[in-house]
Every structure is written in C-alpha cells, then in structure tokens.
Image (cartoon, grey):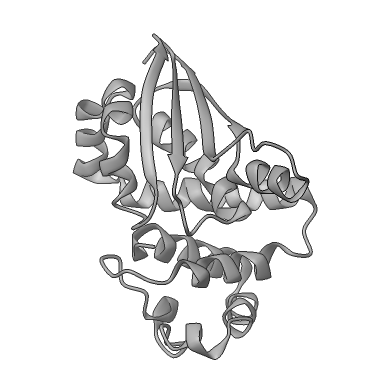
Amino acid sequence: MKGLVFREFVRWYEDTRGRELTLRAYRSLPDTLRAHLDPDREYFGLLAASWYPTEIATAMLESITWALTPEQRTTLLRTGVEHAVGVTLTGVYKILFRTLVTPERHAKYAQKIWDNYYNTGIVEGRMLGENRSEQWVTDWSGHHPLLCELSIWSLTAFHQHMGCSDVKVSRSACVLDGQRSLRSGLQPEAAGCRFLIQWRSR
C-alpha cells in the first residue's frame, strides 16, 4: 500500500482522536510490522511516496474500529477517507483533477489510478450509462473487509472531487462472497469486488 493516503488518514485520526488512541493502534501491530514505523516521529514516519505492507493498515484499522458500532465504523472510515483524499487533491491539483478527470476517464484508466495506491489487484472500469459506472477488482491479494469498505468511500470522494453531485457508491459483490460459497460447497458467485457508482451530471 502506498503511504500517500494512509499517512493522511493516520494524521487525521491522531488529530481528531488523540495520540494515545493512535499509539494503541500502533502497539496492536506485531513486531515485524512495527519495524516499518517509528513511533518517535511525526505520524510514525510514514512517507507519502513509500510502499508499506497492507497488513499495517488493516491491523491498525481493526484496532481503531473493533469496539465501534457498524454506524460508527462507517462514519469514521468515510470521514477519514474524505479528509485524506481531500488533502491529496488541494490547490492546483484540485483544479487540475476537476478539469481533467471525468467519470469516463476514471473508468477508462481505473487500473492506473488504482496502481497509485495498491500494488496488487486487477481493476476494470466501465460506463453503464451517462451517470452510472462500475469498477470490478480481482486478484487483490491485500483484500480486507475494512479496505473494501474504504474503497466505497474513496470512490465516492473521487467522484465528488470531479464535480459530480449526489454520488452514491454501493458494493454489489465482494471476493468474500465467493470464499464463503466455496466453504459451503457452493459455486462461487463472486471472484472479486464489484462497485456500482451513480451520480448526477457534473
């Protein structure tokens, strides 16, 4: 996982929830993962351009959400992602993003956009209509339920920054559905995660 959005999420969490809760999430990591972070540096020394094991993010997310209700967890993930994406798209970058990136281009270049954040996963995007598209993610070895939920809010934030209004993103399939089917001896219906994106005209 690239440090760009992860670092900004950690920054937002520490600024809003406090250092102690953030350290608690850090301490929940096994030693092998802690070795990638430095608790004595600001935001654990996370660098925007560096790559980190996905397990660091998933373990910390599990730590900060385990005692939350589903509604509280959703609010935390949505708000954190909105902040993190917003920080990475500020100033001239925000203007360029809104000018150059459209839902059509987002669908066309879904893999290239994905590769800026993850180093595993095959992504296909396609338009389903004037104000609807879908994104299909397969071979995502770093998949985790919380990262999958984060994808919903990331896609929402990206389309909002494109200038789309009333954006709604839903997950119509998840790789976990296929895994559960296999364990039950059934034919898996999902070999990946499918996200449906809808919005009003820009």
Residue pictured at 59% horizontal, 71% vertical? 59
| Left or right of residue 180: residue 51 | left
Displayed quadrant of residue 21: bottom right
Q: Can you tell which quarter of the image residue 58 is in?
A: bottom right
The vertical placement of 148 against 67, above or below, is above
> In this image, 26 relative to 122: left or right?
right
Give the image quarter of residue 189. top right
As displayed, is residue 197 above or below residue 4? above
Residue 76, image x and y in percent?
63, 53
Residue at image coords 45%, 40%: 137
Count all numbered tags in the image, as a single digit: 0
Give the answer, above or below, for where 137 lies relative to 67: above
Residue drawn at x 39%, y 36% is: 158
What percent of the width, then of the height, locates residue 134? Answer: 45, 25
Outermost residue on the top side: it is: 130
Q: Quadrant of the C terminus?
A: top left
Which x, y percent locates residue 49?
25, 66
In this rendering, position of residue 8 left or right of residue 60: left
Q: Position of residue 155 (x, y in %)?
A: 45, 36
Image position of 74 (left or right of 199):
right
Comparing 165 with 132, the one in front is 132
State which quarter of the image contains the N terminus.
bottom left
